[in-house]
Image (cartoon, rainbow, N blue to C red):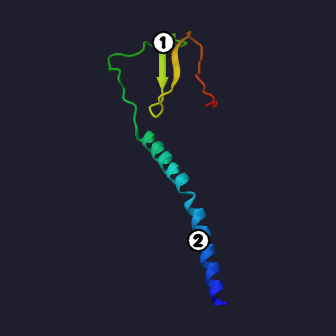
Amino acid sequence: MGFFIVFMAIMSGAEGTGQLLSLAPNASQATAASNRILSARETKLQNTIAPDEGVEDVDGGIKIELRNVNFEYPTRKVLVLKGINITVEKGQFAALVGASGR
């Protein structure tokens, strides 16, 4: 009788361990994602405009024109923007929104 109790305890423990180990890939992906988020928070934008330069102070904004812009994420080699041309007139607002809506 004692054999069956110990046997069932070992089997139950092995099953639980197997289920826990099946989560290992998800845990490593979560760790990698959190490390990317933390490293992004630590990056600081560098001001590339000299103090004596700048955008002239204009009421109502300025016109912005982008010509032949290409963009890809560093982790993927797929072009997200390919040769896009955009003109945002003075006083207008514009946003580029991806498939996720963000």
- Residue extending farthest to the bottom is 1
> Dot 2 lies on which element?
helix
Closer to the N terminus: mark 2 or mark 1? 2
> Dot 1 lies on which element?
strand
Q: Quadrant of the N terminus?
A: bottom right
Residue 27: percent from the left, percent from the top?
53, 54
Residues 57 and 21: in front is 21
Residues 67 and 63: in front is 67
Residue 49: percent from the left, percent from the top?
35, 20
Residues 77 and 27: in front is 77
Residues 51 and 14: in front is 14
Residue 28: percent from the left, percent from the top?
50, 52
- Residue 12's place in the image compared with 95, above or below, is below
Residue 40: percent from the left, percent from the top?
44, 39
Q: Residue at x 47, y 47 (%)?
A: 32
Q: Residue at x 41, y 41 (%)?
A: 42
Residue receiving disc 2: 14
Q: Is residue 98 left or right of residue 77?
A: right
Q: Nearer the viewer, mark 2 or mark 1?
A: 2
Q: Residue at x 62, y 74 (%)?
A: 11
State the mark number for residue 68. 1
